[in-house]
C-alpha cells in the first residue's frame, strides 16, 4: 500500500516504556517491543494480561499513560490516520454494522481505506467460503470474523494487527487463516498476532512475547525460549521408580505408577549416567512445547507473586 | 415458580431500567406539580376560573391535545383534563419501549441466550421481565399518588379515592402497553422493527382518542384503545372506576399471548420473519457520514411522518379554533391568538421541543457506535476522529433543519387545505424558528458525549425535558427573569405572530458552534470507551 514518504522506519511496531493506567489499575507497564517487516510476532498472555490494551495503544485508540508507541516511525496517538494507512486491524469481537450486508460491509471497509486489492479479495472470499449476501446481524460470529479477516488481508497492509482473530473459526477456516498469514509474511508484511491458541502461535510465529500482569516477562524466538527452559526427559521403569540422587539442575515429578518426568536444565548426560542400571524400559527426551513453556512461566510467576506478597 | 433464577431475571431487568424510570418519574412528578400548583396560582378566584372555563371548554385545539374538558373550574377537574391523559401517554410510551428493550433488545444483543440457558423457561423469562415492569409501574403509581395526596388531597382539591383513580388511569395504560411491547417483541424480528410496530400502535391509539374528541357523535371510538379508556374513567368529574377493569383485563390478556408465543418459538426467531439474504446497495458507503445518512433515513422518515401529520392537523384546525377564540376574546401567553396564524404561533412551542428531542436522539446514535465497539473498527482504519464526529454532527444538523422546515411547511399546507389565510413564508419562519434551539441542544448533547460518554444519551434527553419544563413552570412559580432566561426555550418566540428573537437566535447558534467545536476537540483527545 501507500508507503508514507519521509517516514523511513522499517520497524513496523516500536514501543518504548509504553504503559497504561485506568485509574489505580495498571493495565500495562514498561513495554518495549519491536516488530520488523516480514515477521510474525506472537503475543501471548492470559485474560486481563494487557494484550488488548497494548493493541489499543498501538492503534492510537487510547492515549498512553507513559511512553509511546510508533507504527513505521509514526506516533500512534498523535498521527493515527497517517499510521493506519499502512495498518489493518482484526478485532477479537467482530464489531460491524448490523444493517449492512456482507458485501456492503466489505465495500464500506474498503472505501474507508481508499481501495483494496479486489482480485485478492475475491480469492479470500472463495478461500474462506464466505457468503456475502446476508445482513451482518444474521451472520454467526465466525462469519462476521471472516468479514474482518477478508477486509484486512485484502488491503495488503504493511502491518496486520490481529487480536485473537480465529476465536470464531472452525478448523478448516483456521487452516485457511494460516495459509493467508504465511502469504502475508512471504510478501514482506509484518503480523502482530495476539492469541490464546498456542498451537497456532507455534505454527505461525517467528518470535513470541509473553505478557503477564501488564509486563513482558519473556521474549524471543521459540528456539531461544526452549533453550532457556528445561528439556523434558520421561523415563518408564520396570517397577516402582528407584530413589535417585539427582544431578544439579534436574527436578523430577512422578507421572503415574512406574514413570517419572525429569526437567533438565543443562546437559542430559549426568542424568543418563544415574539412570544406567535402574531398570529403565523406555526413555523419551523432547523439547518443551510452547504450552509447557507458557504454563511454566505462569507457575513461576505465581510463586514469585506468592513470595513477594 | 418464583425460584431464584426468575428473581435474578427480575432484578436484572429492574437494574437495566432504573435510570430511565427515574427520569420518567421525575418528569411525571414535575408535570403533576406544575399543573396542580400552576392552576391554583394562575386562577386563584372562582371568577377567574369561570372565565377560563368559558374560554376553553369548547376549544377544539385543546381537545386535540388533551381531550374533552368536563369541569375546568376546579383543580381536580383541570388536572383530569390537562395532565392525566398526557401523563398516561408518557407512561405508556416509556413502558412500551422498556418492554421491547428488555425482551427483543436483549435477544438482539445476544444476552437473552445466556438467560435462557439458565434454569428458566422461555415463557418464564418473559413473565419475569413483565413482573419487573409491573413492579416499576407500581413504583410510579405510589410516587404519583403520594404527590397528589400531599399537594392536591391535603389542599382539599381532590378526595383520596379520586387521586387513586387518577393515578390508576395514568399507570393502567402503561401496564397495558408494557404487554403490547412484550407482544411486539415476539412478533417482530428485530428491536428496531418491534419499536416501529409498537410505536405505530401507540400513535394509532392517540390518534383514535383525538378523532373521538374532535369529531361529533363518535364518542364510542374512545372505547377502542387504552388511551381512549383513560378519558372514560373521569375520576374527578364522573367517577367510573369500572373502566379501570379494562386495563386490569387487557394487560394480562395481551401478556398471556406474548408468553404463549415466547414459549413456542425458537430463540432469535419471530412470528413475522424476514429473508435470509438481502440485496446489497453500494451507494452512500464512501465515508462514515454517508453511512450515517443511510442509517438515519428510516428514522428521519418516521419523525417526518409523525410530527408532520400532527403539524398538518394543527394547521387544518387553526382557522376554526381562531374563530372560537374570537368569540370569547381571550388572550393567552399575552398574545392575540384569535387568528389562525396567531394560534399556530402559540402552539409551535411544542414543535420546538419535539425537534429538539429529535436532534438529541442523535447523541444515542453516536454513543451506540462507540459502546458497540464499531468505533474501534473505524478508527483502526485511516479515518480521522474529527471528521467522524464532525460528519455525524453535520448529518444530524441537516436532518434537524429538514424536520423543522417540513413541520412549518405542513402546518401551512394544513391551513391552506381548510381555509388559508396563513402565509407560507410565515409558517416556514415558524418552522425555522425551531432550528437554533434544536441545534444548541444537539451541540450540548455532543459535548456530553465527548466528556461523559456513558450517560450522555439519557442526559441529553433529560436536558431538553428539564429546559422545556422550566420554561413551562418557571414563570408559574415566580422565578426571577434571569433564571428563566437560562432555558433556551425562553428565547424561542411565538413566530410568526411575534418577530423572531434575532439576538437570542444568534447567541444560541454561536453557543452551539462553540459547544460543537469543543465536543469535536475533546472527542479527538479522549480514550474510546467501549461497552
Image (spheres, helix red, strand yellow):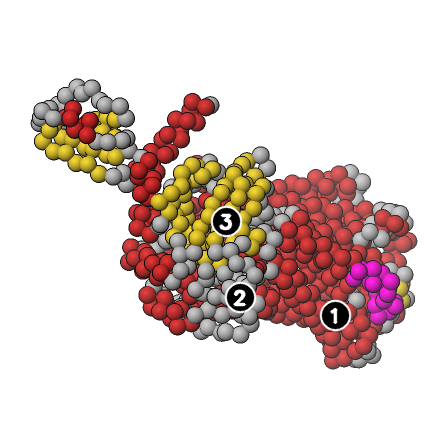
Q: How many other residues sit within 10 Å of disc 1, few (<14), some (14-19) or many (≥20)?
A: many
Numbered disc 2: what chain?
A
Residue under the point 53% across and 44% down = A16
Residue under the point 77% across and 41% down = B151
Numbered disc 3: what chain?
A
Q: Which of these two is toward me, B522 or A1?
A: A1
Q: Which residue is mark 3?
A: A14
B128 falls in the magenta region: no
Q: How many other residues sit within 10 Å of disc 3, few (<14), some (14-19) or many (≥20)?
A: many
Residue B242 in picture, x, y percent from top left: 61, 51
Snapshot quadrant of residue A284: top left
* Left or right position of B375 against B310: left
**Residue A112: image tag:** 2
Q: Tell me, yes or no, whether the two marked residues, 1 and 2, touch with CB atoms within 8 Å.
A: no
For numbered disc 2, what is the local secondary structure?
helix
Residue B473 in picture, x, y percent from top left: 81, 50
Q: Which of these two is toward me, B405 or B119?
A: B405
Q: Which residue is mark 1?
A: B314
Does B383 sit above or below residue A297? below
Residue under the point 50% across and 41% down = A31
The answer to whether residue B87 of the structure is visible from this angle is no
**Residue B59: image tag:** none
* Left or right position of B79 against A148: right
Instruction: Tell me the magenta residue range.
Output: B493-510
Q: How many other residues sit within 10 Å of disc 2, few (<14), some (14-19) or many (≥20)?
A: some
Q: How many marks?
A: 3
For numbered disc 1, what is the local secondary structure?
helix
Amino acid at each position: 500500500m501507500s508507503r508514507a514518504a519521509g517516514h523511513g522506519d522499517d520497524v513496523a511496531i516500536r514501543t518504548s516504556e509504553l504503559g497504561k493506567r485506568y485509574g489505580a489499575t495498571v493495565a500495562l507497564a514498561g513495554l518495549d517491543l519491536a516488530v520488523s517487516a516480514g515477521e510474525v510476532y506472537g503475543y501471548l498472555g492470559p485474560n486481563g494480561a494487557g494484550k488488548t490494551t497494548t493493541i489499543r495503544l498501538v492503534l492510537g485508540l487510547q492515549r498512553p499513560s507513559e511512553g509511546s508507541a510508533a507504527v513505521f516511525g509514526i506516533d500512534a496517538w498523535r498521527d493515527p490516520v497517517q499510521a493506519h494507512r499502512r495498518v489493518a486491524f482484526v478485532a477479537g469481537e467482530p464489531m460491524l454494522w448490523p444493517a449492512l450486508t456482507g458485501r456492503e460491509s466489505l465495500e464500506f471497509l474498503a472505501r474507508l481505506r481508499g481501495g483494496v486489492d479486489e482480485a485478492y479479495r475475491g480469492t479470500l472470499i472463495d478461500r474462506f467460503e464466505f457468503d456475502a449476501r446476508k445482513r451482518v446481524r444474521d451472520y454467526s460470529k465466525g462469519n462476521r470474523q471472516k468479514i474482518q479477516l477478508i477486509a484486512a488481508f485484502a488491503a495488503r497492509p504493511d502491518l496486520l494487527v490481529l487480536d485473537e482473530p480465529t476465536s470464531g473459526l472452525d478448523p478448516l477456516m483456521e487452516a485457511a487463516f494460516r495459509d493467508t498469514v504465511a502469504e502475508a509474511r512471504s510478501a514482506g508484511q509484518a503480523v502482530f498476532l495476539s492469541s490464546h491458541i498456542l498451537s497456532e502461535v507455534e505454527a505461525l510465529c517467528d518470535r513470541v512475547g509473553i505478557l503477564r500482569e501488564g509486563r513482558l516477562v519473556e521474549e524471543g524466538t521459540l528456539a531461544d525460549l526452549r533453550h532457556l527452559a528445561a528439556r523434558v526427559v520421561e523415563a518408564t521403569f520396570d517397577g516402582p521408580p528407584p530413589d535417585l540422587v539427582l544431578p544439579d539442575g534436574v527436578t523430577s515429578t512422578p507421572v503415574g505408577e512406574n514413570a517419572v518426568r525429569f526437567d533438565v536444565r543443562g546437559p542430559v548426560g549426568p542424568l543418563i549416567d544415574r539412570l544406567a542400571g535402574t531398570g529403565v524400559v523406555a526413555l523419551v527426551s523432547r523439547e518443551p512445547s510452547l504450552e509447557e513453556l507458557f504454563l511454566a512461566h505462569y507457575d513461576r510467576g505465581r510463586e514469585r507473586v506468592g513470595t513477594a506478597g | 415458580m418464583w425460584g431464584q433464577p426468575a428473581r435474578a431475571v427480575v432484578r436484572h431487568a429492574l437494574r437495566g431500567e432504573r435510570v430511565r424510570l427515574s427520569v420518567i418519574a421525575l418528569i411525571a412528578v414535575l408535570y403533576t406539580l406544575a399543573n396542580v400548583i400552576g392552576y391554583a396560582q394562575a386562577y386563584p378566584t372562582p371568577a377567574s376560573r369561570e372565565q377560563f372555563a368559558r374560554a376553553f371548554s369548547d376549544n377544539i385545539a385543546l381537545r386535540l391535545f388533551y381531550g374533552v374538558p368536563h369541569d375546568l373550574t376546579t383543580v381536580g377537574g383541570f388536572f383530569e383534563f390537562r395532565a392525566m391523559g398526557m401523563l398516561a401517554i408518557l407512561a405508556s410510551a416509556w413502558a412500551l419501549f422498556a418492554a421491547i428493550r428488555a425482551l427483543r433488545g436483549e435477544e438482539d444483543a445476544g444476552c437473552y441466550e445466556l438467560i435462557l440457558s439458565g434454569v428458566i423457561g422461555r415463557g418464564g423469562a418473559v413473565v419475569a421481565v413483565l413482573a419487573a415492569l409491573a413492579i416499576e409501574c407500581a413504583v410510579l403509581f405510589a410516587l404519583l399518588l403520594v404527590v397528589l395526596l400531599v399537594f392536591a388531597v391535603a389542599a382539599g382539591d381532590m378526595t383520596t379515592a379520586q387521586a387513586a383513580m387518577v393515578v390508576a388511569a395514568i399507570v393502567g395504560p402503561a401496564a397495558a402497553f408494557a404487554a403490547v411491547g412484550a407482544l411486539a417483541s415476539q412478533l417482530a424480528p428485530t428491536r428496531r422493527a418491534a419499536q416501529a410496530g409498537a410505536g405505530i400502535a401507540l400513535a394509532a391509539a392517540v390518534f383514535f382518542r383525538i378523532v373521538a374528541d374532535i369529531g361529533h357523535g363518535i364518542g364510542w371510538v374512545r372505547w377502542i384503545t387504552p388511551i381512549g379508556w383513560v378519558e372514560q374513567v373521569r375520576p374527578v368529574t364522573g367517577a367510573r372506576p369500572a373502566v379501570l377493569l379494562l386495563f386490569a383485563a387487557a394487560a394480562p390478556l395481551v401478556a398471556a399471548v406474548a408468553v404463549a408465543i415466547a414459549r413456542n418459538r425458537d430463540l432469535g426467531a419471530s412470528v413475522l420473519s424476514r429473508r435470509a439474504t438481502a440485496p446489497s446497495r453500494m451507494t452512500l458507503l464512501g465515508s462514515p457520514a454517508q453511512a450515517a445518512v443511510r442509517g438515519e433515513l428510516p428514522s428521519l422518515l418516521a419523525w417526518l411522518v409523525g410530527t408532520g401529520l400532527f403539524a398538518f392537523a394543527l394547521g387544518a384546525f387553526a382557522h376554526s379554533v381562531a374563530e372560537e377564540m374570537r368569540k370569547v376574546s381571550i388572550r393567552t401567553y399575552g398574545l392575540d391568538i384569535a387568528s389562525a396564524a396567531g394560534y399556530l404561533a402559540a402552539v409551535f412551542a411544542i414543535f420546538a421541543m419535539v425537534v429538539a428531542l429529535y436532534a438529541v436522539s442523535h447523541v444515542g446514535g453516536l454513543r451506540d457506535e462507540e459502546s458497540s465497539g464499531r468505533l474501534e473498527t473505524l478508527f483502526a482504519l485511516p479515518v480521522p476522529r474529527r471528521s467522524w464526529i464532525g460528519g455525524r454532527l453535520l448529518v444530524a444538523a441537516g436532518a434537524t433543519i429538514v424536520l423543522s422546515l417540513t413541520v412549518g411547511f405542513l402546518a401551512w399546507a394544513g391551513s391552506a387545505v381548510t381555509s388559508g389565510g396563513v402565509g407560507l413564508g410565515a409558517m416556514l419562519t415558524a418552522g425555522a424558528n425551531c432550528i437554533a434551539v434544536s441545534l444548541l441542544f444537539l451541540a450540548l448533547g455532543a459535548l456530553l458525549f465527548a466528556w461523559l460518554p456513558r450517560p450522555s444519551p439519557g442526559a441529553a434527553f433529560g436536558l431538553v425535558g428539564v429546559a422545556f419544563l422550566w420554561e413551562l413552570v418557571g414563570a408559574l412559580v415566580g422565578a426571577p427573569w434571569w433564571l428563566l432566561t437560562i432555558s433556551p426555550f425562553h428565547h424561542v418566540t411565538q413566530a410568526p405572530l411575534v418577530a423572531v428573537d434575532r439576538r437570542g437566535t444568534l447567541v444560541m447558534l454561536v453557543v452551539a458552534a462553540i459547544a460543537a467545536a469543543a465536543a469535536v476537540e475533546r472527542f479527538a483527545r479522549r480514550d474510546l470507551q467501549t461497552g
